[in-house]
Every structure is written in structure tokens, then in C-alpha cells.
Amino acid sequence: MPEDDFGRDIGAAERMVREWQERATEKAEKFGRMQQEIEQISVTETSRDGAIEVTVNSAGILQGLQLSENASNRPMAKLAAEIMRAVQTAQAKVPELMQQAVAGTVGLEDSAAQHVLGQARKYFPEMPEDEEEPQKQGSGLQELRYGVEDDYEEPQQRRQP
């Protein structure tokens, strides 16, 4: 092998390594931007009547809950169900926002990005069905509820002799 060929081979190898490093650095920067954008995702959902407002972060964790005064006019079970519905609706929107962040940074073709989106779709709830009252799904078992009556009486003060 002539010395010129050896020098060209080393030079070509060095260029390949340098280009690979540049691509890896660029990809790492894109993934860093993607992570930052995903971390900034926040979804706020409001109930139909505006009495309930919830905010969830990119992990689907409840970050804020606002109840208007007219929210207290409903039975607690209904209020709880409406809060949960708003939270699930907000959480169901997170994967789409994550997809937008991925598309704008690393691109949807990237296999690691596809894995991130697949996990989001797997773990976030589907959009709740549009119903006034959520229907209970029967399991064939009868639900038993136990309650404690509030018969607490304030202890009477003892008089000192």
C-alpha cells in the first residue's frame, strides 16, 4: 500500500469520526430541546359549566384545581366525578402535545422519539366519552359502601372545684 493511500484512508476515517460526532452532538441538542419542550407542557381543562378548572403537567400530574362557588351546590360524588373527568380529559391531550414537541425537534421518524410517544399513548388515558353522567361499568359484583355516622359530640368541660 503506497503511503499516499494510507494517508487518505486515515484522513477519510478522521472525517467520518468527526461527522459522526457532529451528528451525535446535533442529535443530543435536539433531544435536549425536545425534553425542555415536553417538560413545559401544561394542559388546563374546564368543566362544561365552568365550575371546575384543572391543570396537569406533561407527566399528567395535577398541578392546579380551581372550584367556583357554584361547584359546592352539587353532591360530593358528582363533584368528584366531574373533577376526575376534567383531569382525564386534560391528561388525554398530553400525548398530542408531546407529539408536536417531538415533530418540531427530533422529528417523528426517530425510533427513540417513537418510543417516548408510544409510552405516552400507553400510559395516558383515552379521552373520556362525552356523557353527562358517567355510567358505571358493571363487574357483576354488587358494590357495598360503608359509612360512618357523624355522631361526634363535643366533650363537656369539667369544672374545677
Image (cartoon, rainbow, N blue to C red):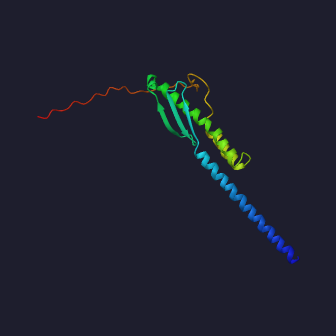
Describe residue 6's horizontal placement relative to residue 133 as left or right.
right
**Total labels drawn:** 0
* Residue displayed at 60% across by 49% down: 36
> Taking the image as drawn, is residue 103 in sight?
yes
Image quadrant in which the C terminus is located = top left
Vertical placement of residue 66 versus 49, above or below: below
Vertical placement of residue 123 versus 141, above or below: below
* Residue displayed at 62% across by 49% down: 35
* Residue displayed at 80% across by 70% down: 11
Q: In the rendered image, which quarter is residue 3 located in?
A: bottom right
Residue 88 versus residue 150: which sits nearer the camera? 88
Residue 14 versus residue 73: which sits nearer the camera? 14
* Picture coordinates of residue 89, whole percent (x, y): 59, 32
Residue 77 versus residue 66: which sits nearer the camera? 66
* Picture coordinates of residue 92, whole percent (x, y): 61, 35
* Picture coordinates of residue 100, whole percent (x, y): 67, 42
* Residue displayed at 41% across by 27% down: 147
Image quadrant in which the N terminus is located = bottom right
> Taking the image as drawn, is residue 144 in sight?
no
Q: Residue furthest right?
A: 1
* Picture coordinates of residue 57, whole percent (x, y): 55, 41
Q: In the rendered image, which quarter is residue 155 located in?
A: top left
Q: Residue furthest bottom?
A: 3
Vertical placement of residue 73 versus 24, above or below: above
Q: In the rendered image, which quarter is residue 42 located in?
A: top right
Describe residue 55's horizontal placement relative to residue 154 as left or right.
right
